[in-house]
Image: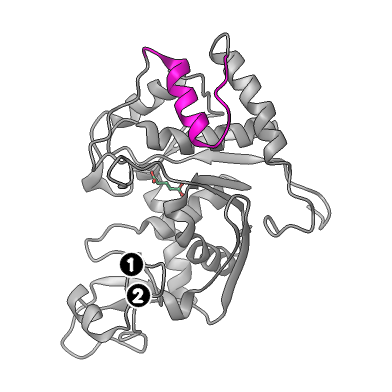
Amino acid sequence: MNAFSVPSYCGRFAPSPSGPLHDGSLVAAMASHLDARARQGRWLLRIEDIDAPRVVAGADRLIMQQLQALGMRWDGEPVWQQQRLRRYQEVFDGLLERGLVYGCACTRQEIQAASRPPAPGSHERPYPGTCRHGVAAGRSVRAWRLRVPEGVERFNDRWAGPQQQDVARDVGDFTLKRADGLWAYQFVVVIDDADQGVTDVVRGADLLDSTARQRVLQRILGASLPRTLHVPLALDERGQKLSKQNHAPALDLDHPLQTLNRAWTFLGFEALAAAGIEDFWSRATAAWAQRFPWPGPQDDGFK
Ligand code: GLU
């Protein structure tokens, strides 16, 4: 590809199969689906089952049925992260060879005790770098961390606008392999997006503050930097994120147009008096394309 060609659009929806979709996760699914449709791009489905203890058996199938019932069809075969463990190991080994990851013996309590308070807008304390130059004698490695280079990561989110984060200072060397032996979300999501050729990440605003970390990893791995669009999170009446943990009710598929319109109006649009599901999607796609026109070449994003 030369410097001037624009790769065609590839988006994805990446639910964690910890339960069926609810009104909150539908907002993210809808936004990413619409953005892909508006660009006549591909829309992939990735089942993010890396966090095995949180997986609920059968939730992946339920999610697929829900998407189909609401007229959202993904391209190609879905990908399950559990099928990709060898690939994650291979990328990890490459980083290890380059001296870019190191073993860490710290417990959560030790990090709490040694670290500065969380940066504004963050809820985790930055890792203080205790094991960066080796694990103290007699201690054993629990987790594996990325050596985060210094510098400020800047990007322009298509919904939230200009963003910046000093990852080394505000997050520190973050975990690629957790103390329980599982690959970390931040690590595998970057490998998956890169391997699947994802050009555009559209997802919930709870992941906006993960984006700078993911960009750091993308740069280290020589991957492309996808554009992002983070949609607001749906909250329940107590102001909590609608989530499976908070027992948000599953989607109402008996009244698909009402269900679709709930997510659609949450995204700030007028309800659509659609004749059917397909009609809903074609009208919604046209309205989305108008509100989120394709970013110009001067916009930060895919490069
Ligand atoms: N699996 C994540 C979730 O269900 C989404 C990750 C992503 O879109 O990057 O919240």
User: Are there few (<14), some (14-19), or many (20+) residues within 10 Å of tag 2?
Assistant: some
Please give the label number shown on residue 245.
none
Seen in the picture, residue 168 relative to 254 is either above or below; the reply is: below
Q: Position of residue 203 (x, y in %)?
A: 49, 45
Q: Are marks 2 and 1 in contact (CB under 8 Å)?
A: yes
Q: CA distance from mark 2 to mark 1?
A: 6 Å
Identify the residue at image location x=51%, y=24%. 72
Q: Secondary structure at mark 1?
A: loop
Instruction: Evaluate whether residue 64 shows in this view.
Output: yes
Residue lying farthest to the top in this orientation? 275
Whether 257 is among the magenta residues is yes
Quarter of the picture containing the C terminus is bottom right
Please give the label number shown on residue 118.
2
Occupied quadrant, residue 123? bottom left
Beta carbon at label 2 within 8 Å of ligand 1: no
Identify the residue at image location x=53%, y=23%. 73
Occupied quadrant, residue 145? bottom left
Q: Which residues are magenta?
A: 254-273
Instruction: Evaluate whether residue 77 shows in this view.
Output: no
Name the residue tied to disc 1.
123
User: Are there few (<14), some (14-19), or many (20+) residues within 10 Å of tag 1?
Assistant: few
Q: Position of residue 95 (x, y in %)?
A: 47, 70
Residue type beneath disc 2: Pro
Beta carbon at label 1 within 8 Å of ligand 1: no
